[in-house]
Amino acid sequence: MTKKINISLKWGYDLNAREIEQMSNIIHYYDPGLPLDHLYKTHILKHNPLFVIAFLGNKIVSFQSHTIYYSSSPFFKKPTPIILGGTAYQTKEASQKGLANQMGNIFLSYCFGSFWFLKNLVFIADTVNPKSLRGIEAIFKGAYPNIHENTPDNIADFANKMMKRFYGNQIEISNNLVMDNAHEYFEKTDITQFWDSMYATKEKKYQSFYLNEGVITKENNRYFIGSKSIVTITYYSPKKMLKHFFNETFNLKVNKALNSQKAVWHERIPANSI
C-alpha cells in the first residue's frame, strides 16, 4: 500500500535537528556546491521563515520556506504582503502530482485565511531553474523577467530593494534580474544528471534565457549552476485573475465562432473547385 504524503507547517526556529539535517542533505544532494550549513545560516538563522514540509512517513520529500514583508510595490501603492520565497526542493519520491501547488495553498491559507484569494499579494523569489520561471508565469499569468523584453526600471529597483533586505547589501542585480553574490558557493554544481528531468523546458526559450544570462553554463555538453540566479517577481490580485478569466472565456467563444463559420464556408465550396 502506498504511503500518503503528509504536509505540515513549522517556523524555522521550531525545526528539530533531524529535520534540519534531512533538508540540508536534500539541498546538498541537488546542489553540492553549497555548504552543508547553507539552510541554517542563510535562511533559518537570519529570517526564521515559515516552512511547508511534505513527509512520506518520517522522511522529508519536499519543502518550501517563505518570509512575509509588507511594502508598497510597483504593482500596488498601498503596503501589501510581499511573499519572499527562500528555498524550495522536491525529491524524486515526492511523486504526487501538484504537490508544490498544494503546499503553496496550505501556506497561503495558514497566513491569510481560507479566503486568501481575495487579497492582493506580491511574490518574489530567486531561482536557477528555467522550469520555475515558466511555472510562475503560467500560474500568475505573467512574471518578470519577461524573456522577450527588458525589465522596467521600477521593477528592477524593487527587486534590488527586496533582495538586499533579505540577503544583504553585497548582492548585485542586473537589469535582466540576474542576481549574484547572494549565496556562498564552494564551486560550480554539475546538474547534468538532473537536466532533462528537472531543468530543461519544452519551450527552449526559457533555458536559452538562463544560459544566455550565465545563470546556467554549458561546458563540454555538461550543465552547471553557481552563484548566479534569476529573481522572479509577479503579483496576484482578484481583479487580475477575473480579467484573465473573462479574456480567456471571450477568446474561446470568438475562436469557436470563427471555426464554426470557417466550417460553414468550406461546406459551401464545391469539392471540384478546390
Image (tube, helix red, strand yellow):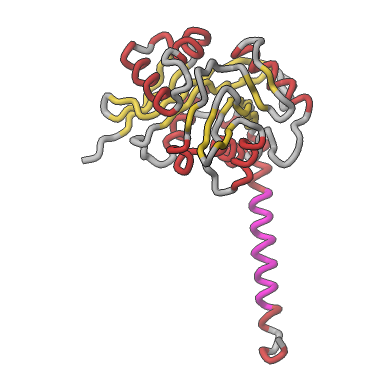
Quarter containing the C terminus: bottom right
Quadrant of the rendered structure where residue 155 is?
top right
* Rendered position, 155 above or below 192: above
- What's drawn in magenta, residue-wise? 247-264
Viewer-nearest residue: 266 or 204: 204
Quarter containing the N terminus: top left
Give the residue displayed 35% in from the left and 16% down from the top: 21
Query: Residue 233: x, y in percent?
Result: 65, 29
Question: Looking at the image, which residue sits at the far right?
Answer: 153
* Count of numbered labels shown in the rendering: 0
Viewer-nearest residue: 196 or 8: 196
Query: Residue 20: x, y in percent?
Result: 37, 15
Query: Residue 91: x, y in percent?
Result: 38, 32
Viewer-nearest residue: 65 or 194: 194
Tell me, yes or no, whether the highlighted magenta stretch contains residue 250.
yes
Give the residue displayed 29% in from the left and 35% down from the top: 4
Quadrant of the rendered structure where residue 79 is?
top right
Give the residue displayed 76% in from the left and 35% down from the top: 150
Mainly helix, strand or loop, the magenta region? Answer: helix
* Rendered position, 71 above or below 230: above
